Amino acid sequence: MITARLARLRGSLLAEEPGARGLERVARNPGCQRLRALTMIGVTPATAMKTVYKEPDREGQSPFALAAGNRFERAVFENGAARLLELYRSAGRLTTAECKIVVVPELAPGATAATMARRRAETERLFQHKVRRDPRAPNIIVKARIPVALLGVPHDTEPDVLVAADSDAFYGPVEVKSYPDRAGKTNAADIRSACRQAAVAVIGLRHAVEQLRLGDPRQLVPAAADLVLRRPGSFRPTLRPMTLAGEVHSLERALDEAPRNLEELEALIDAITPGASLDEAEVLDAVPPNYVEACREHCALAPKCKQAAAACGDPVLIGSQAREELAAAGSLGRAVDLLRGRAQPRTAEERALQARLQQSLGEYRQAVGHGR
Amino acid sequence: MAGELDLVARLLAYEGGRAVSIATHRLMAIRPDALVLCPLAMAGEDTTVHIVAVGAIGRPPEIYCVADPRVRDEQYELFAWLGARIERHFETCRRAGEYPQIWVSSGAVADHLDTLADRQRYNRENAAVKRFGELLSYQTERYPVDGQQALITATGALRMHWATGQQPGEDEHLGTLLAWIEPPRNTNILDAVALAERVPMGVKTDPEFDRDVLEPRVAAYNQARRGGARAVELRQRAGLIQQALEPVVRSIYDGTQRAIRILSRMGLPELPALRNLEERERDEFESFMASRDAGYHLPLVDKPRPAAFKLTAREDAADNFEAAVLCGDGVGRARARLAGHTVYGQVENPRRTRLSPHRFRYRFDLVSRQRVLRVRRRDELASLGDPRLRVTVANVHREGAVTRISAIITHGQQAVGLPASGTTLELAKTVPDWDRLIRTRKQLRQRLVATPWTHDEQGTAPAVTRARRPPRDPLAEVEALR
């Protein structure tokens, strides 16, 4: 039933799995209904850019970067994930005897719907072993498949790795990224993005614990994860335990914004054009975006949304701070008119804004005009 | 409100479709012997340089390209070649008692050089590459220090002098920044910016270019190399790779040179404090080279003591640079005035009170109409006109739009004297103090004779002692620590 409703909203677009990356993207810009709608129906912004707007997607990855990422993953997981095990042993997180590894895709190879269902079932079985303290419970699960009902629609997520010592009550997620680990100098945006993806895995694990009635989700799955990054210039992994309380909380909050379920999305689309689908450019255009500075980092639709922002003179064009500061004016055109004294303020807020802007303009002119 | 002046400048730039100037002085040195350095890395390979363009200001570049930087020997040859040029530059500067300055296009390049320096200065396989990493470390270690003159990013330099009508994050692309500063004629600025954005200006090539042009050529080269192809064929294949990469690196090199030209052509007077900043740079460079000559090792992670010294130096540099811009640059001062970081007003009621036969107290009121003021009792302020005049705030009284600040002169009673009634005065909390670092270092040396237990390798906490009675005058105890 849900599948049919989603297919109706997608129209001619093919369904894609948003995965942790897609859900993390929503958390980066919770106010963007356009991104949320696409994620809910299982379409990436890159696909929308190419298929709906017929414009090139400039968000692709270089083949060199892809190859480097793949080589790193291979290096981590080859020989029965020997390097990963070594990493956890040297950090004192696993003992020599704790070496049970299960690679879920190897239990159910293929890419059909039936295979995916089997992977989910295998993952559930492994979780039950762990909760029962079964000695067969693996210490490391690679690519477990966990269904998560987010945005009112079920999505499957595949955390890179789940890890637990024999004495641990349950598994914790591990995010494997080929970002160079430069300790305090590591790119903050990379770390933020990896942490948010790990937070999706935390939510997924809690959801699984709840669904399978394995115990108290928050107790069994604390808001924490490990990041496995790589040493600069090599394929040797590094381990960074991270706490994710903030990320989990912000993700939960972000996913709670409207439209938060399929009914709300259908109502939104029907209000634009009854019975419409999101494969039509006019319909997608009518779903309100929320263009912010960070959009360029993660969303292929950013150039399109920037054009829309330019068309209406959205103050965000000159920075996120401007959107707040110029809120009373509403648009750049109006703010410029107030600044130049070409428009009369309509409200007390506009009057205050005009006074502030004109005072700053006076100081600026005086400084630049006279110099020192 | 901080940034309000910059907001207005961005609004003006947006309205006019071109960047507007936000400095009355040039805030960094442009050394005539500086090197312009533009490396391009291979995507996903964080410690590589695929092609590099290097040259002096106003001169065409020398270019060195390797077919595949993942092949270690080829990569080391490039590093040794580049290292030789940097070494030569360093030697020339050292002989002249100067410091080496390197210009790059953007912050991404500076970060990449930092990764390279961190990695290569520990190279055990090739002495020339190790030396390259060590020398590069001078620039990359200085880069995070405010007011440094060793490693300048073109985007950073332009942003200090121009405000554009786009988002601050978009200013990190040199091409878009240049489009705002010198917009092409008869083209809408947003279209020009969108076009400029497509040209790589950082440290990596465009993913599409990698996929369609570069990757097939690199793959063909590697296939030929593995297949034992003759040297002529390998040279030809490597030539094709250089042919693809050279226009990209040249365009970044030209953009960086253009940025330097724009800054030079602005014809702004130098920030008065620039000579102090350059003096410090010379000292830092000489100290760095002396340390290399003595064979000292460059650590990847500092131990607690040197870390404390470096952190203090960075804090001092940040304070001094901020104060130098505030004192010396007209826009910097206007920015501080709007944000309430300086007090600007008219002197009223100046008076000299006799405290004893030979002791006097000098006080006056400063009446300000600033909307925002960040001043409170006991604040110590210095005059921006003549920093020898220092005061302590005795009282702050706000009535409507007028703030009356009662000040007691603490320094400069004789040298500057009591300001006359009606004089306009501007006071700030910080003025540059170029000797402060020496005093702070001396104090740190005394304090850190024994490493605090929090940073000691033993990590033993001191025994718990019974808390003594709270001091009668806590402020006096704090002052005693100074």
Image (cartoon, rainbow, N blue to C red):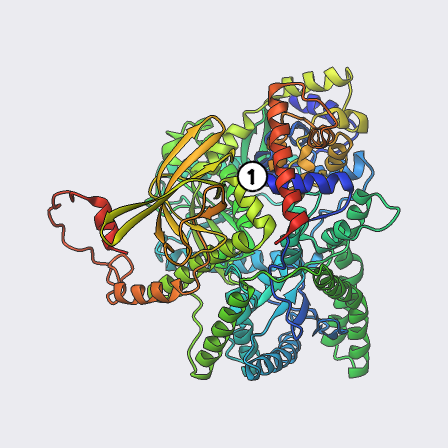
Residue A40 makes an appearance in the image: yes
Identify the residue at the far right of this view.
B186
Which class describes the residues within 10 Å of circle 1: few (<14), some (14-19), or many (20+)?
many
Q: Amino acid at mark 1?
A: Arg
Quarter location, residue B260: bottom right
Question: Relative to B284, is B355 above or below?
Answer: above
Residues B115 and A88: in front is: B115
Q: Give residue B101's position: percent from left, percent from top.
A: 60, 71
Question: Relative to B470, is B99 above or below?
Answer: below
Please give the name of the residue rendered at 39% of the width and 60% of the height, measured from the top-left corner: B312
Question: Is A301 displayed left or right of A209 in the figure?
Answer: right
Quarter location, residue B474: top left
Please give the name of the residue rendered at 21% of the width and 58% of the height, measured from the top-left corner: B460
Please state, as top left, top right, bottom left or bottom right, where the C terminus of chain B lies in the image: bottom left
Q: Give residue A313's position: percent from left, percent from top.
A: 74, 32
Question: Relative to B479, is B229 above or below?
Answer: below
Q: Give residue B238's position: percent from left, percent from top.
A: 77, 74
Question: Is B9 displayed left or right of B347 in the figure?
Answer: right
Please give the name of the residue rendered at 66% of the width and 21% of the height, measured from the top-left corner: A265
User: Which residue position is annotated with label 1?
Assistant: A119
Please give the name of the residue rendered at 71% of the width and 63% of the height, measured from the top-left corner: B264
Dot 1: chain letter: A
Question: Is B151 displayed left or right of A217 in the figure?
Answer: right
Q: Give residue B344's position: percent from left, percent from top.
A: 50, 42
Q: How many marks?
A: 1
Identify the element where label 1 is drawn: helix
Residues A75 and A45: in front is: A45
